[in-house]
Amino acid sequence: MSKQRPIILGIVGDSAAGKTTITSGLVKLLGADRVTHVCADDYHKYDRRERKALNITALHPDCNYLDILELHLERLHYGQPILKPVYDHSTGSLVRPEYIQPREFVIVEGLLGFTTATMRQFYDVKVYLNPPEDLRRVWKIKRDTTKRGYTVDEVQAEMEKREPDSRDFIRPQRQYADIVVHFHPNEGVPPEQAGAQLNAQLTLRPTIPHPDLSYLIEEGSPNSGVRLELGRADGKPVDFLRIDGSVTPQHAAELEQAIWRHLPDLHPLSADEFGDYNDRAEIRHSDPLAITQLLLTYHLLRKYNDVRLLPFAQPVAALSRLQPTSVHN
């Protein structure tokens, strides 16, 4: 019997949007021995010093080997290994490449993962992280000053420099996502004070099947902290799953149990085993984050079971067929 091909999840968002935080929870839920993690930012053409000399940001497609990322996504889709470049964020240097053998699930996260139609065809599930810009700014300053050796002034200057590329190349990728994740504080709460009380809004587009949460429309109440609402996004019908940061542990557990019932292949984890994030040197827990990670896990396992029933098609001269696609597609 042919080996089943990997299931590929794409997570795209601007710098410090929470991609690594989402990914770490998925790895815990699925099991580290079943997941291969690929950072699309490793495909930078230039190191930090060269980017400064060339006056180009890491968010610009011309600063990345997107054609090689396309080829590698195809190989991963067919269960084949890749020799992945590696970019060291702590030093801003390009270092020795890494041999990657895909496991059952491959999570590809980065800045430009949905840029071309060629890339997008190889993902089974596509997620875009869309926090408010003032919140993302707070997250980026915290991360880059504690982990990457920048000063606050340097981070702020870099964000201003990057804004045109964020506008032109990062945010337009949101339209291609199956799920858009929007963490946000309550109105009037400064982003630096939101902490674990961030709300989550998940835009669930009908491009993939979602678990039946329709009972939340009838049973959800303003006081439950969890609601499912019908609406429109970008002119198209969608479902909005809204999870208040102040959701009670009881209501959060009820929704988590509703999703766990769709995951018979996994051993349920306790609520404190995922949904964690780093706040400088402190590890904190968020129920909206945990529910988001659990819902994404559902989608990966559903697709895994769907693919299990299909024959695994081996590539035929795959690499010679694939032509790099314009980044403006």
Image (cartoon, helix red, strand yellow):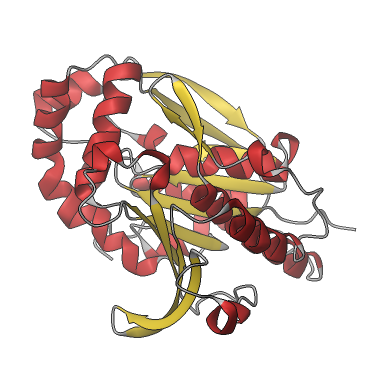
Residue 54 visible to an observer of this rendering: yes
The location of residue 50, given as percent across then percent down, is 18, 22
The quadrant the C terminus occupies is bottom left
Residue 91 left/right relative to 274: left
Task: Check the image and report above or below for 227 versus 142.
Answer: below
Q: Residue at x 25, y 62 (%)?
A: 172
- Residue at the extreme right of the image, as rendered: 1
Q: Nearer the viewer, residue 292 or 325?
A: 292
Left or right for 316, reference 170: right
Answer with the quarter of the image where residue 300 lies. bottom right
Q: How many marks?
A: 0
From this viewpoint, is residue 39 visible? no
Q: Residue at x 15, y 36 (%)?
A: 159
Q: Position of residue 291 (x, y in %)?
A: 57, 55
| Residue 305 placement (x, y as % from top left) | 77, 65
Quadrant for the N terminus in the image: bottom right
Q: Position of residue 6 (x, y in %)?
A: 68, 52
- The relative height of residue 309 versus residue 103 in the rendered view (above or below) is below
In the image, farthest residue toward the front: 223
Quadrant hosting residue 160: top left
Between 161 and 282, the one lying in front of the other is: 282
- The residue located at (29%, 55%) in the rendering is 186
Foreground pick, 329 / 108: 108
